[in-house]
Image (spheres, rainbow, N blue to C red):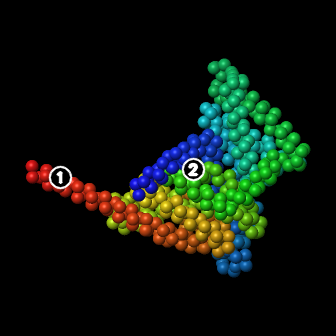
């Protein structure tokens, strides 16, 4: 066991930890993560409105409350859709500003100005103007990848121009706000002079504007992101990063968020149109089937710890069970510990992967509904799974089944870990007993 542990630590220290560290400190990964975090409140409310507009009742129901809700929704559909269209429908507005502000802060730029510059850069290529109207086709999920690229590009241009002192500098007596406005004049001109002609050129050559061309190029990758191998790979990376002590969830969700939001927008559009939902692997799937209680699906483990034979583990269970309901499991990860603990490595990594296979297969077979709503990641798993799927009941059954299975898979490894701790405690007690007796006799 000692040699196995040393080998595992060696692999983690030489391969996994450096890679995770580089990814976690990458400016662009941080900026993308911050951009989606900034947009999250608007998207959650927009998703909630869509669920309210399309209640989970059969269209031909005659139950009083359900019939009244359906009739109200049908009568005032256009008015009720407005909050959704101005939140989820224009999610790229919030994402581009968030990315620009975060990246600008990392380059020591004014975050407000860099966020607004990123917003303008996105609109320049993704919101064509015709017949006195702006097209909104690429302002939701279809424009996410364009928002990422234009936000990063505009902020880098701003940073490079400022670094080389290519800017308009006013005397110190000028108010700070006015000086900042003039400072960004040249970056605005450069963005317009580069992105607008590029967009016109690509449209002339291909018949597609930039966001349409990007989605055409990324179509295979977006499709692959919704496959079972993509689910398993993202879970595996997240668990390995966490086991090495690095926040793997931030890294993986930072990479997957653009795909999740693109696919969520497609599911919501299908729901509004009354057609089949096309995608399975979304953030609601990740949060409520694969991270029940936090990374590693540790809520069932917390319940097992409550009845542990080891005092230390029982204490950790009492400390960790309530936070685990809300998917916060650091007390268990670092208190048990699970991090860098070879006795719990296998269940920690593979339990979420087993749940992923079961939940993905059940969804593909049509046994459980697909995600149509964005939920807070702290929502308890059964409630969140139902909320994310328009308040259907089958995901609750799936969550409870995954919890029971997770407990069964964790149990033998926990018992082995308990035996090793009890053996160590007995050896320590046996070693210290003669010393205590000697001290008393003296």
Q: Residue at x 14, y 55 (%)?
A: 437
Residue located beneath label 1 in the image: 435
Residue 331 visible in rendering? no
Taking the spot 63% from the left edge, 20% from the top edge, the residue there is 172
Residue 253 pos. (x, y %): 61, 52
Please identify the quarter of the rendering in which residue 201 is found.
top right
Q: Secondary structure at mark 2?
A: helix
The relative height of residue 103 versus residue 175 in the rendered view (above or below) is below
Q: Nearer the viewer, mark 1 or mark 2?
A: 1
Q: Is residue 194 left or right of residue 312?
A: right
Residue 206 location in percent, x, y?
Answer: 88, 48
Which mark, by number, is residue 71? Answer: none
Residue located farthest toward the front when viewing the structure as drawn: 3
Q: At numbered mark 1, what does the secondary structure look like: helix, strand or loop? A: helix
User: Could you classify mark 1 by the number of other residues whose Cα lies within 10 Å: few (under 14), some (14-19), or many (20 or more)?
Assistant: few
Please state the horizontal and vertical placement of residue 383, each as a whole percent of the image. Answer: 55, 66
Left or right, residue 184 beside residue 29: right
Q: Which mark is residue 250?
A: 2
Q: Is residue 135 left or right of residue 261?
A: right
Q: Which residue extends farthest left?
A: 442
């Amino acid at each position: 066991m000692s040699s196995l542990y040393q080998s595992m630590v060696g692999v983690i220290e030489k391969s996994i930890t450096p890679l995770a560290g580089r990814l976690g400190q990458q400016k662009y990964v941080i900026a993308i993560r911050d951009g989606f975090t900034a947009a999250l409140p608007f998207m959650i409310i927009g998703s909630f409105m869509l669920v309210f507009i399309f209640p989970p009742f059969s269209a031909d129901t005659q139950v009083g409350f359900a019939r009244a809700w359906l009739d109200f929704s049908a009568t005032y559909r256009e008015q009720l859709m407005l909050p959704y269209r101005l939140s989820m429908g224009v999610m790229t507005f919030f994402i581009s500003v968030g990315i620009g502000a975060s990246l600008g802060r990392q380059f020591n730029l004014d975050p407000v100005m860099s966020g607004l510059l990123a917003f303008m850069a996105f609109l320049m290529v993704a919101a064509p103007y015709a017949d006195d109207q702006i097209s909104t086709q690429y302002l939701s999920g279809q424009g996410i990848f364009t928002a990422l690229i234009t936000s990063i590009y505009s902020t880098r241009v701003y940073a490079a121009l400022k670094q080389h002192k290519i800017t308009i500098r006013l005397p110190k007596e000028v108010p700070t706000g006015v000086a900042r406005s003039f400072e960004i004049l040249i970056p605005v001109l450069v963005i317009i002079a580069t992105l607008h002609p590029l967009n016109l050129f690509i449209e002339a050559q291909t018949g597609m504007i930039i966001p349409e061309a990007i989605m055409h190029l990324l179509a295979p990758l977006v499709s692959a992101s919704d496959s079972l191998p993509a689910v398993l790979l993202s879970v595996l990376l997240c668990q390995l990063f966490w086991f090495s002590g690095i926040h793997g969830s931030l890294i993986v969700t930072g990479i997957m968020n653009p795909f999740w939001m693109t696919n969520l927008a497609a599911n919501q559009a299908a729901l509004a149109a009354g057609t089949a939902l096309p995608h399975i692997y979304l953030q609601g799937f990740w949060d409520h089937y694969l991270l029940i209680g936090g990374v590693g699906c540790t809520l069932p483990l917390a319940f097992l710890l409550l009845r542990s034979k080891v005092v230390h583990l029982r204490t950790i269970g009492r400390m960790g069970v309530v936070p685990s309901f809300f998917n916060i499991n650091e007390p268990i990860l670092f208190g048990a510990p699970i991090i860098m603990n070879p006795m719990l490595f296998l269940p920690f990594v593979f339990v979420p992967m087993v749940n992923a296979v079961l939940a993905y297969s059940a969804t593909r077979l049509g046994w459980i509904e697909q995600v149509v709503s964005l939920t807070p990641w702290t929502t308890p798993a059964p409630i969140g799974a139902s909320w994310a799927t328009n308040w259907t009941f089958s995901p609750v059954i799936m969550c409870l089944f995954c919890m029971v299975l997770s407990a069964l898979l964790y149990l033998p490894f926990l018992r082995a870990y308990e035996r090793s701790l009890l053996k160590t405690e007995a050896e320590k007690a046996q070693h210290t007993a003669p010393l205590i007796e000697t001290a008393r006799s003296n």
